[in-house]
Amino acid sequence: MTQEAGFIIGDLQVERMIQALSSHSGATTQKQLSPGKLIVFTGPSGVGKGTLMRSLLQRHPELYYSVSATTRSPRAGELDGKDYYFISHQKFEQLIAQGEFLEWAEFAGNYYGTPKQSVLNKINLGKSVVLEIEVEGAKQIRKAFPDMFSVFILPPSVEELEKRLRSRAQDSDTAIARRLMRSQEEIQVAHEFDLQIVNDDFDTTLHDIESALFQSSDS
């Protein structure tokens, strides 16, 4: 293996896993989307899950997006209360102590979490709720909602993921290396989720997700 910018590349096991999933990325379980359903999008940072989720919401306004909270600083164009609730470390830790999060995790030096009450309220009203969260948080939520529908988005390759992260021009080399190293650990658990799909073509990926979520009950 070689090392570049602190990131170990050439992990053949991860590459083989991505290639295997790419060959049947539309495969999923027989779960059906029903009223009051929780839908979770997860995957490595930079894989495109946020863009896919936003397009899904635009095409299906009946879905409700649950805004997560974070302690990181807003990126260019992000709005408080729309993209995230941007709060301090102290406030986040206070909410943890009060049991206000459905899940939470620390990633790249910042906290991320899903406010609990708004999700529960919508599900109780029969709404389908969409979350975009880190892999660790998705695993936490599965314990509370074992019948949730989970979508794990993968990159076409580790090299492509690095290219996407760098093209965002939002992180330092050190932060990118940390995200890439973590992505290898996350990809190892992709098989634990209902739908594993490789985001190598945006329109195809979006169509496959819609097919899995909105297939008719008699299909």
Image (tube, helix red, strand yellow):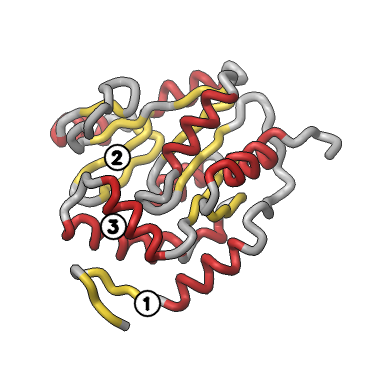
Which residue of the protein is positioned furthest toward the right in this rendering? Answer: 218
Which residue corresponds to the image point at 28% horizontal and 81% vertical from the top-left?
2
Q: Give residue 105's position: percent from left, percent from top.
A: 31, 46
Which residue corresponds to the image point at 52% horizontal and 24% vertical from the top-left?
58
Q: Which residue is mark 3?
A: 179
Q: Which residue is mark 2?
A: 112
Q: Using the image as rendered, state which of residue 139 and residue 177 is in the foreground.
A: 177
Query: Disc 2 on helix, strand or loop?
Result: strand
Q: Which residue is mark 1?
A: 10
- Up the image or down, 128 lies above or below 212; here it is above
Mark positioned earlier in the residue sequence (3 or 1): 1
Q: Give residue 75's position: percent from left, percent from top.
A: 22, 34
Give how far apart the Cα atoms at labels 1 and 2 are: 30 Å
Which residue corresponds to the image point at 30% horizontal and 52% vertical from the top-left?
165
Mark positioned earlier in the residue sequence (2 or 3): 2
User: Mark 2 or mark 3, which is nearer to you?
Assistant: 3
How crowded pointer 3 is (Cα within 10 Å; few <14, some 14-19, many 20+) is rated as: many
Q: Please identify the quadrant where the N terminus is shown.
A: bottom left
Q: Give residue 162's position: percent from left, percent from top.
A: 33, 59
Query: Disc 1 on helix, strand or loop?
Result: loop
Mark positioned earlier in the residue sequence (1 or 2): 1
Q: Give residue 99's position: percent from left, percent from top.
A: 32, 32
Place residue 124 in its image quadrant: top right
- Up the image or down, 25 lies above or below 42; here it is below
Q: Tell me if 37 is positioned left or right of 66 in this view.
A: right
Query: Mark 3: which amino acid?
Result: Arg
Place residue 113 in its image quadrant: top left
